[in-house]
């Protein structure tokens, strides 16, 4: 398996623009997580899905953030409109519940100017 | 609420010496504990976990961790450090299953620098 795949790896955009981050989890994994990593706040869980259903989105910072998982092999995290304080590395991870450990993608480094 | 503390922002160790990266936790019930490593510009990689059983857990790349319930600690150790071990290390905890998925809480991370 190729592992968790994220795209794009780097995104530079201007304030106010819409940003869409993409994730393909490991095949067969039934949990998918979106995290944000910054120097100031460390690793923050934004939202997670189980069997494509959002379970807990309490970490989503604002209504500007939304996430979807239309099928077992694809998820998106959207920011609209983006702001400079959204600049961070966004990670997607997946896991098999019974084994618990999470497998992380390489991340998307987002810069909002 | 569960939490993880990694008291050292950075740990420096000479190559060949033993290393320890500290972690303490707070959770209701018996914890599930994890260590992950992050190399520059990469995602986190799972190293090892403790769920139950032997307090000494062995993981990838020669790392091990010792669960100490009385001290609520789960320190990461390696007998002989390599320069290639230099990375950011994260401790994580979750509460035991209780009818639903329990979120994992990650620590802030400890930067390990192995000096040649």
Image (spheres, coloured by chain):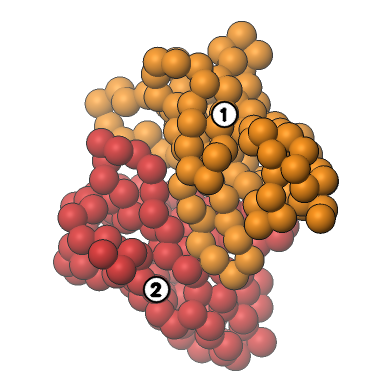
Chain colours: A red, B orange
Query: Does residue A38 appear to the left or right of B31 in the view shown?
Result: right
Secondary structure beneath disc 2? strand
Between disc 1 and disc 2, the foreground one is 1
- Work out whether residue B62 or residue B96 is closer to the camera in this orientation and state it: B62
Q: Are marks 1 and 2 in contact (CB under 8 Å)?
A: no
Which residue lies under the disc numbered 1? B65
Marks 1/2 same chain: no
Chain on which label 2 sits: A
Residue B74 in percent (x, y) is at 59, 26
Residue A45 in percent (x, y) is at 48, 52
Residue B78 in percent (x, y) is at 64, 36
Other-residue count near label 1 (Cα within 10 Å), few / some / many at <14 / 14–19 / ≥20: many
Q: Looking at the picture, does residue A81 appear above or below residue B22?
A: below
Q: What's the mark number on residue A6?
A: 2
Q: What's the mark number on residue A44?
A: none
What separation in Å lies between label 1 and label 2 (alpha carbons)?
A: 31 Å
Q: Looking at the picture, does residue B17 appear above or below residue A78?
A: above
Chain on which label 1 sits: B
- Work out whether residue B38 or residue A79 is closer to the camera in this orientation and state it: B38
Query: Does residue B110 appear to the left or right of A65 in the view shown?
Result: right
Query: Does residue A87 appear to the left or right of B99 in the view shown?
Result: right
Secondary structure beneath disc 1? strand
Q: How many marks?
A: 2
- Work out whether residue A33 or residue B80 is closer to the camera in this orientation and state it: B80
Other-residue count near label 2 (Cα within 10 Å), few / some / many at <14 / 14–19 / ≥20: many
Q: Looking at the picture, does residue B51 appear above or below residue A81?
A: above
Quarter of the picture containing the C terminus of chain B is bottom right
- Residue B7 visible to an observer of this rendering: yes
Residue at point 48% right, 53% down? B45
């Amino acid at each position: 398996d190729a592992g968790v795949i994220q795209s794009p790896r780097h995104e530079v955009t201007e304030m106010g623009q819409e940003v869409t981050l993409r994730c393909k989890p490991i095949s067969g994994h039934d949990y998918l997580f979106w995290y944000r990593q910054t120097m100031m706040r460390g690793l923050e869980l934004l939202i997670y899905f189980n069997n494509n259903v959002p379970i807990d989105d309490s970490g989503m910072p604002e209504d500007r953030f939304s996430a979807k998982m239309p099928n077992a092999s694809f998820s998106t995290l959207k920011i609209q409109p983006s702001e400079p304080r959204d600049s961070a590395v966004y990670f997607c991870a997946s896991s098999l519940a019974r084994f618990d450990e999470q497998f992380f993608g390489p991340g998307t480094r987002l810069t909002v100017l | 609420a569960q939490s993880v503390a990694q008291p050292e922002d950075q740990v420096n160790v000479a190559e060949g010496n033993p290393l320890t990266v500290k972690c303490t936790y707070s959770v209701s019930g018996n914890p599930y504990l994890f260590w992950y490593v992050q190399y520059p510009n990469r995602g986190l990689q799972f190293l090892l976990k403790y769920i139950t059983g032997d307090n000494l857990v062995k993981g990838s790349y020669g790392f091990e961790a010792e669960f100490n319930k009385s001290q609520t600690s789960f320190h990461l150790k390696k007998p002989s450090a390599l320069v290639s071990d230099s990375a950011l290390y994260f401790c994580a905890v979750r509460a035991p299953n209780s009818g639903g998925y329990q979120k994992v809480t990650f620590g802030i991370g400890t930067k390990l620098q192995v000096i040649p």
